[in-house]
Amino acid sequence: MFNQLYESFVISFKSVFLSKGRAFLTMLGIIIGILSVSLMGTAINGIDNVFDETLGMFGEDVLYLQQFPWFMGNTEWWEFRNRPRIQEDYARKIADRAESVSFASIETSRRVNITYKERSSEGVEVKCTGWQSAYIDAAKIETGRYFTQVEDEHASRVIVIGSEVKKVLFPEIEDPVGMQVKVNGLNFRVIGVFAEQGKIFGMFSVDNMAVIPYVTSKSVFGRSWWLSISLKTRDGYDNNFALEEVRHITRGLRGLRATDPDNFAINQQEMMEDQLGKIKTAIGLVGIGIAALALLVGGIGIMNIMFVSVKERTKEIGIRKALGAKRWVIMMQFLFEAIIIALIGGVIGLILTALLVGLVNKIFVASMSFGLVLIALMVSIGVGIVSGIVPASQAAKLDPIEAMRYE
């Protein structure tokens, strides 16, 4: 039995390569289908791989009280624009009244250039926060420290810089703590360097940043029009409970009546998770749609070429049957041929995917896994079986005497 299967496989393999051009054209649908499935899978795998790392920057137990929601949905932008701004004293009042909140910090930001001697780090996002951010911010300090409550309240000119800023300003200095840099023409003493955080979803670097005390920022930049408040949920309290408590307190601070809608937003990591799920679903649906259509065309192409192959080799089938070949052996011969065509097409699709992953990574995150390769190969084999079963069955049912007479 094994020898007969092996012989059927060898004959099938040789048959495929006897007409390479026809076989390749037949494979095109499979190649496009597997390429679509694989690229979709690499994109989804890439998103999953950076998911925890990226969302960790926002903090699982941190709420953000802001004027705008992170995702506006179908609501018009002007409806959010007309909302009253977040007030500076909200942070202290919420921290005093909310039992589920352990720390609350005011925050704003500016884009500035930071200089050290002749070197300049351009377009740095300077976050201006309260001292409480040392206990809220998910970013880790690599060297040095965060600023203290005293430094914040006394408007000390101290700064914690991101790893990218450190590389630009101090390429030859391992630890720049204690160095003086200029922000807005004023001297600031570097007291810490953040550990490298990477990119949001693999695309936007968050290391080109720095943090200074909020009170200091008022003397350097003046009044800020945009304010946000970061709130850390106290241990033992659920995030949803904290959100509702902060929402109730904020409505009171805003003077809203029971029938008035919220004129503020409380954002959290969960919103990013929901949005990520929608992105993955959209990528999946588009990829599956393109792949299904391409695989259908490819499958029909394989079936058609197999019918042609059976017709062309009818006499050969008759001779093999007359020499004692059983129906299942003939059937496996043509089924193997269909599977080989589909499998080679799948392998070519995977090779093209591997080559394209590098390009995809320049505009989006992508990651090719062994599981994805296995799934793509199984899909190829499945298409080959489905496409080849009818022609192979037809070949197996041929009458040997009539088949040998066929011209």
Image: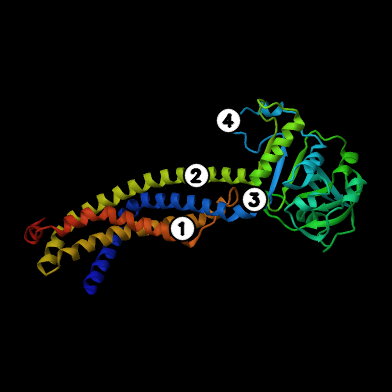
Q: Residue at x 10, y 56 (%)?
A: 406
- 10 Å neighbourhood of mark 4: few (<14), some, or many (≥20)? few
- In the rendered structure, which amino acid carries the disc numbered 2? Thr
Quadrant where the C terminus is found in the figure: bottom left
- In the rendered structure, which amino acid carries the disc numbered 3? Leu
In this rendering, the label closer to the viewer, 3 or 1: 3
Q: Earlier in the sequence, mark 2 or mark 1?
A: 2
Q: Is residue 402 left or right of residue 156?
A: left
- In the rendered structure, which amino acid carries the disc numbered 4? Asn
Query: Which of these two is toward me, 172 or 285?
Result: 285
- In the rendered structure, which amino acid carries the disc numbered 1? Leu
Q: Where is residue 154? Give x, y as percent.
A: 93, 46
Can you tell which mark lies on residue 55?
3
Please give the residue where the numbered disc 1 appears in the rendered image: 372
Q: Earlier in the sequence, mark 4 or mark 3?
A: 3
> Label 2's element?
helix
Q: Where is residue 280? Give x, y as percent.
A: 52, 46
> Label 1's element?
helix
Spatial CA distance of label 3 from label 2 is 18 Å
Q: Earlier in the sequence, mark 4 or mark 2?
A: 4
- 10 Å neighbourhood of mark 1: few (<14), some, or many (≥20)? some
Spatial CA distance of label 4 from label 3 is 24 Å
Query: Which of these two is toward me, 357 or 54?
Result: 54
Q: Is residue 60 above or below residue 69?
A: below
